[in-house]
Image (spheres, rainbow, N blue to C red):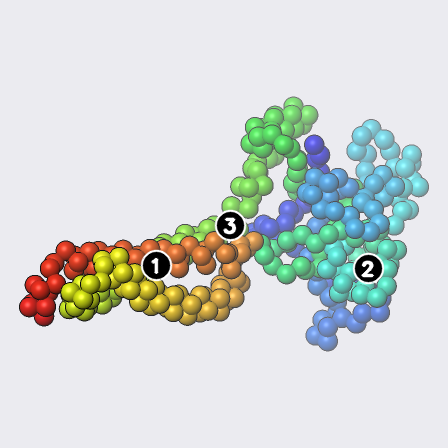
Amino acid sequence: ESVATIDSLMLNTLNTQSSGFNVDGVEPPQDAEAHSADYAWADGGFFAAAGIQILQGRAFDDRDRRAIGDREGGNLEDRADASERASVAIVSQAFVDRFFPDRLPIGQPIHRPGESDVEIVGVAADAMVRLLGEDPRPFVYLDSDQIDTVNTTLLARTHGDGKALAARVLARARALEPEIMVIESRTVADHLGTQLLPSRALAVSFAVFGVLALMLAAIGLYGVVSFAVAARSREIGIRMSLGATGTSVINLLMRGAGALVVGGGAVGILLALVVTRVAGNLLFRVDTQDPLVFLAVPATLLVVAAVATVLPALRALGVSPSSTLRSS
């Protein structure tokens, strides 16, 4: 669907780059000569390929091209006017929120210590730069068509099989340039694998411990409720001798066990709501207050309590009232 290049793709823990930037009207930190922001060199097609929306202004295009060498058989004399064009940049919304909260960023200069200034021509939606789930951070995209980059990442968007397409793109690239050096070829899902590995390991650990906790709670609840019902065998015998039916006795015991589970479940849900606020910082795009979980766990314990009530109650009902009273 679209293809683009960028020198350092985001969410790569082994390759992050930042540089000093200043803008008019915003003083740098006291202990530094410039503000720091992450940046990358990208071409005009990157935003469509990466699915990053341009919120203001425009993406890079041919009007920003600078004469940087004899790339396609042309010469610098033919493109002398292009070499005079200003360097341009596209900034993230977080950059605008921090440095231009009350003024339009388009057309404003960004000063780079030791480098030429760049002019803001567009504002892009925030993207995750270093970590999944991070707060939006200022980011600056510089036009890669205005420099000669040594290393670059080719990004291709497709609806089909990404791995199959990657092999075809690699074959085509080598056909165009046999001496091209390809360090790696992978899908975005594979690219995110390193970032997701700790989260996935944590999720599996939470799932295992959650299941174990539910099993322990169920076993403990079954033991407590069944013991409480068995301890009422004499009461059951008296009620049966006075004409109570088995259904009424079971309903009575169920109400008692249900009150126990409902009371404990209410306390547990309140504690879980508090704990999930803390756990939310460890999760990415996961609802820490999923209604399904908060309904499924108490429902499971209610079923356990019902079974723990009915089984000993049925055993008690199977014994004659006189035998129960004599054994008590």
On the picture, is 145 further left or further right than 248?
right
Q: Is residue 134 above or below residue 45?
A: below
Q: Which residue is mark 1?
A: 301
As drawn, the residue found furthest toward the top would be: 175
Image point (64%, 54%), residue name? 129
Q: Are marks 2 and 3 in contact (CB under 8 Å)?
A: no
Residue type beneath disc 3: Leu
Can residue 233 be seen in this snapshot?
no
Secondary-structure class at tag 2 = strand
Considering depth in this image, is 322 or 223 the residue closer to the camera? 322
Q: Mark 3 or mark 1, which is nearer to you?
A: 1
Quarter of the picture containing the C terminus is bottom left
State the image coordinates of residue 151 (x, y, percent, origin top left). Answer: 66, 42
Image point (91%, 34%), residue name? 78
State the image coordinates of residue 177 (x, y, percent, origin top left). Answer: 67, 27
Tell me how far mark 1 sits from mark 2, CA to CA: 61 Å
Tell me how far mark 2 sits from mark 3, CA to CA: 34 Å
Label drawn at residue 133: none
On the picture, is 102 further left or further right than 10?
right
State the image coordinates of residue 149 (x, y, percent, origin top left). Answer: 71, 43
Classify mark 1: residues with Cα within 10 Å, few (<14), some (14-19) or many (20+).
many
Considering depth in this image, is 245 or 69 the residue closer to the camera? 245
Residue type beneath disc 1: Leu
Tell me how far mark 3 sits from mark 1, CA to CA: 33 Å
Q: Mark 1 or mark 2, which is nearer to you?
A: 1
Residue type beneath disc 2: Ile
Q: Which residue is mark 2?
A: 110
Q: Which residue is mark 3?
A: 196
Classify mark 2: residues with Cα within 10 Å, few (<14), some (14-19) or many (20+).
some
Secondary-structure class at tag 1 = helix
Q: Quadrant of residue 311?
A: bottom left
Numbered disc total: 3
